Image (tube, grey):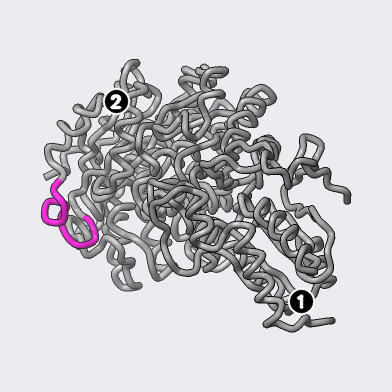
Amino acid sequence: MHYPLNPDIHNDDVQQEPIRAGFGRGLKAAGEADTNVVALCADLTDSTQMHLFKAAFPERFIEMGVAEQNLVTVASGLARAGKVPFTSSYAAFSPGRNWEQIRTTIALNDMPVKVIGSHAGVSVGPDGATHQMLEDIALMRALPNMIVLAPGDSIEAEKATRAIAENGKPSYMRLAREKTPIFSTTESPFEIGKAYVLREGHDVSLLGTGTMTYQMLVAAELLEAKGISAQVVHVPTIKPLDEETILASVRKTGRAVTAEEAQITGGFGAAITELLSEKLPMPVYRVGMRDRFGESGAPNELLHHFGLDGAAIAATTKEFIERMPRYHQ
Amino acid sequence: MGGQLTITQLEKKANDIRQDIIRMLVEAGSGHSAGPLGLADVLTALYFNIMNIDPSKPEWPERDVFFLSNGHCVPVQYAAMAERGYFPVSELQTLRKLGSRLQGHPERTKLPGLENTSGPLGSGLSQAAGYAYSLQYLDNAKHRFVYAITGDGELDEGNIWEAAMFAGKYKLSQLIVFVDRNNIQIDGSTDDVMPLEDLRGKWESFGWHVQEIDGHNIESVIDAASMARAISNKPSVVITHTIPGKGVDFMEYDYKWHGMPPNTEQAKVALKKLRTLDGKITSGDLA
């Protein structure tokens, strides 16, 4: 399938926008399409970008105060009454603080509540480790019934928001605070459960999710200059994984590098290794936070410090390829 | 719906429900005795008089809804639902068994008629508040009501007070909550584990209308619900004083029966006691 990429993706002045901004637009659009869509926020309406929805539909916006446990459980009750509730806070607090409530009253209860965790990852920056949520992917993908998404840019976040408004399922979507380069276009496809090949290659599969997909595209460009052909696969749906697309890529390249702005323990890379070890055992290197917390700093500085930017991923990938023989079927 | 039974008939029904509970628990071999027995009169009043429901249409859009926040007391809800006709009374014997719709703690997706999934304490009140918010602000359904029960030990949970603040802020007047004030929790009396008083003052300060009743006087339960429905600018809480293990003398007032079922011998004695008391459970039992 052809995936239309932003032609400016490798320019220094590539357009950038916070992924959460796309969520804000998508939520407003979802509210226009379905009067059952309601929005609940725990005292972070502007920064989670719910203000657009609030301005358009004040009667369907519910201010919850700084009470994340109540945020998701009230949403569960609203869903029982036929509503499609979106809840937003920082990922460190929701699902960080209220995970059990999500487990019992949304996942086990199979209620179509949309949990939006904004400000995920180290790129939150100067607020430091307390606010840099890294464990949300592991927490949420362990839950039966739960859909887990990490859109890669603001355009995709808008589409993903519309999609979960209509999927009838408990859903989690992680968003980033900082401006993220836009690699997709309004014409690019998005479907829950689908992964997309953004760049063809045959030496290694670079599997990215969320903010890391752009960094994978940068890494692939750098690797090509060194004679390594990397296939970049964007995986915005962490659960359920698009097994067909991922397996086809790794079958072709023989090895994979994953990247996520999260703990590799139980995270996106772990999901990929689980899939490959059962269906296509191949060497995998997981780029991400390796059993440590983040710290304060400028966002790009932190990405570099923790080996999460394109240059660092390219170097890690090259070393991995040299160290690890290709496993052919 | 409901309202046809006299108080005496309702008392008889509550006794049937207590016997159902004993039979369920002894067959299951695990589960909670004290709370369900203590709540039998309240659940009888709700399912046979107070709530506008139709057991043949559990998703009837005009129904009143019931949220059990202290999910471990679900045997009394199952018994009340079976007696009301949601499913055969014989199915009560499947409680806690593999493949049963009657899970150890209530799961909405398993059994039509349940409105929520609960067990971990403190969340059912929020779910009820969310539903009540929808009725009041989004659905313009002024004639429908949301009933909920919480335990008193459950009030230790922070989630409860988040919900209390939320319901107070939005004046969720279609939300009516019974707090099962039986003074016990797993580790002992609520006074020893985590004192709750001034309980009336706490709720009042959160913006709630507060009533206090004898939870074994079915007429009082019905009257309190009626009063709560008449309060149109506040959520209502009914501090419902109950005797844990009510109706089975060797279980009454004893926190050790919180999470324990009777054995076969104890069940025989309990059923005999309940049958002898048949028709005699009246108000005024609260010490």
Extent of the magenta region: B185-195
User: Is residue B136 or residue B262 the one in the foreground?
Assistant: B136
Asked if A165 appears above or below A270 in the picture, the reply is above
What's the residue type where badge 2 is placed?
Answer: Asp
**In the image, what residue occupies the spot 38% across and 28% down?**
B175
Q: Please, which residue is most extreme toward the right here?
A: A1
User: Is residue A173 or residue B225 the one in the foreground?
Assistant: A173
Indicate yes or no whether the magenta region holds residue B37: no
User: Is residue B103 or residue A49 the one in the foreground?
Assistant: A49
Find disc 2 in the rendering and name its residue: B223
Q: Give SS at disc 2.
A: helix
Residue B100 appears at what percent x and percent y? 56, 61
Asked if A83 appears above or below A277 in the picture, the reply is above
Find disc 1 in the rendering and name its residue: A280
Q: In which image quadrant can residue A256 be found?
A: bottom right
Residue B202 appears at what percent x and percent y? 18, 34
Chain designation of label 1: A
Q: Is residue B109 left or right of residue A296?
A: right
Task: Categorize mark 1 by other alpha carbons within 10 Å: few (<14), some (14-19), many (20+).
Answer: some
Task: Categorize mark 2 by other alpha carbons within 10 Å: few (<14), some (14-19), many (20+).
Answer: some
Q: Is residue A222 left or right of residue A119?
A: right
Chain designation of label 2: B
Co-location on one chain, circles 1 and 2: no
Please state which of the two labelled residues, at mark 1 or mark 2, is closer to the viewer: 1
